Image (cartoon, grey):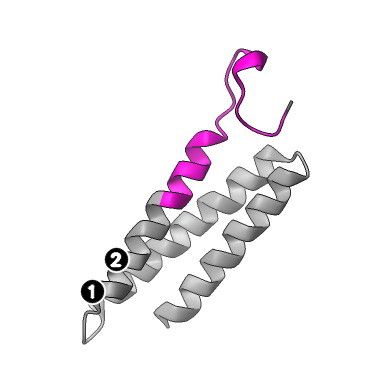
Amino acid sequence: MTTWTLWLGALLVVGGSAALFKHQAVAARALWVLAVLDFAAAAVGAVTASEVSLPLLLAVVIAIVATGALVAVTVPSKNPRERVSADG
């Protein structure tokens, strides 16, 4: 089950990246937040599995950190010149 949740999270990350490419930063952030939640569910599944796979758990943690960084980068700033997102 963990593998499928990782694939679903990867699809959410790709969908968020496509939304950001189309200048829809809000949709991108929403998809990435869903991806982080999906990866967190995968981490819980990996930890509670009968056999804990360290490489799988490491991959899930890296996925959570990377997706969290994508969400953090797209936070809109109050100054339009400082925006890092695709808004402008």
Q: Quadrant of residue 23?
A: top right
Q: Looking at the picture, tell me which residue is in the foreground, 2 or 66.
A: 66
> Pointer 1 and pointer 2: residues touching (CB < 8 Å)?
yes
In the drawing, does residue 25 fall left or right of residue 35?
right
* Image position, residue 66 (x, y; %): 44, 51
Check disc 1 and report the residue beneath it.
54
Tell me which corner region of the image, top left, top right, bottom left or bottom right, holds residue 22.
top right
Determine the residue positioned at 49% across, 79% down: 4
Question: Residue 16 location, x and y as percent?
Answer: 64, 52
Q: Residue at x 42, y 83 (%)?
A: 1
Query: Mark 2 packing: few (<14 Cα in 10 Å), some, or many (20+)?
Result: few
Task: State yes or no: residue 85 in magenta.
Answer: yes
Vertical position of residue 78 compared to residue 44: above or below: above
Q: Looking at numbered disc 2 in the image, what kind of residue is underneath it? A: Leu
Rendered location of residue 55, percent (x, y): 28, 73
As helix, strand or loop, the secondary structure at mark 1 comes to: helix
- Residue 29, percent from left and from top: 59, 44
- Report the amino acid beneath label 1: Leu
Residue 20 belongs to magenta span: no
Residue ID for mark 2: 58
